Image (cartoon, rainbow, N blue to C red):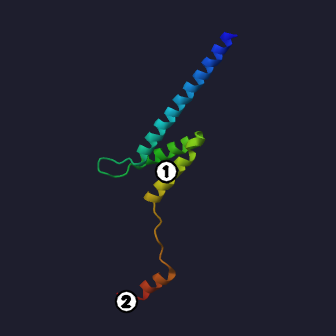
Amino acid sequence: MSEGRFCSLGFISDWANLKAVQEGQITERFTKAIEQLGAIDDNGKPRLELRLGGIHALERIAQESEKDHWPIMEVLTTYVREHAPIKKLKTNNQALIEQTTPR
């Protein structure tokens, strides 16, 4: 009987180690993807291919890790809000006033 208990304990220990390794890998992937979101070249211009890769990496992590899904959605929505703001459109009245106002 004690051999069975040791096998069970060994299995539980191995399972816990596996989960810890998986969590560490997700954390590393998350960190790398966040770095990619802010990637710039030597001239300070955005490296769009790396940024896009970061977005895809975060999407994949969100699909694989239920625990990380909503934090990733918050990161992505903040990224979009900061890097692609909505431009205010002129109302019809503003456009009409600009067209009829002499310059």
Residue linked to disc 2: 102
Q: Position of residue 34 (x, y in %)?
A: 44, 45
Question: Comparing marks 2 and 1, which lies closer to the viewer?
Answer: 1
Q: Position of residue 97 (x, y in %)?
A: 44, 86
- The kind of residue tagged 1 is Val
Q: Quadrant of the C terminus?
A: bottom left
Mark 2 Cα shell of 10 Å, populated few (<14), some (14-19), many (≥20) = few
In the rendered structure, are the residues bearing label 2 and label 1 in contact, judged by CB atoms less than 8 Å apart?
Answer: no
Q: Secondary structure at mark 1?
A: helix
Q: Nearer the viewer, residue 40 or 72?
A: 72
- The kind of residue tagged 2 is Pro
Residue shown at the point (57%, 26%) measured from the top left: 16
Q: Secondary structure at mark 2?
A: loop
Q: Residue furthest left?
A: 43
- 12 horizontally vs 96: left or right: right
Q: Quadrant of the N terminus?
A: top right
Residue shown at the point (49%, 50%) measured from the top left: 75
Q: Position of residue 48 (x, y in %)?
A: 41, 50
Residue 61 drawn above or below residue 16: below
Indicate which disc residue 75 carries: 1
Q: Residue furthest front?
A: 2
Indicate which disc residue 90 carries: none
Circle nearer the N terminus (2, 1) = 1
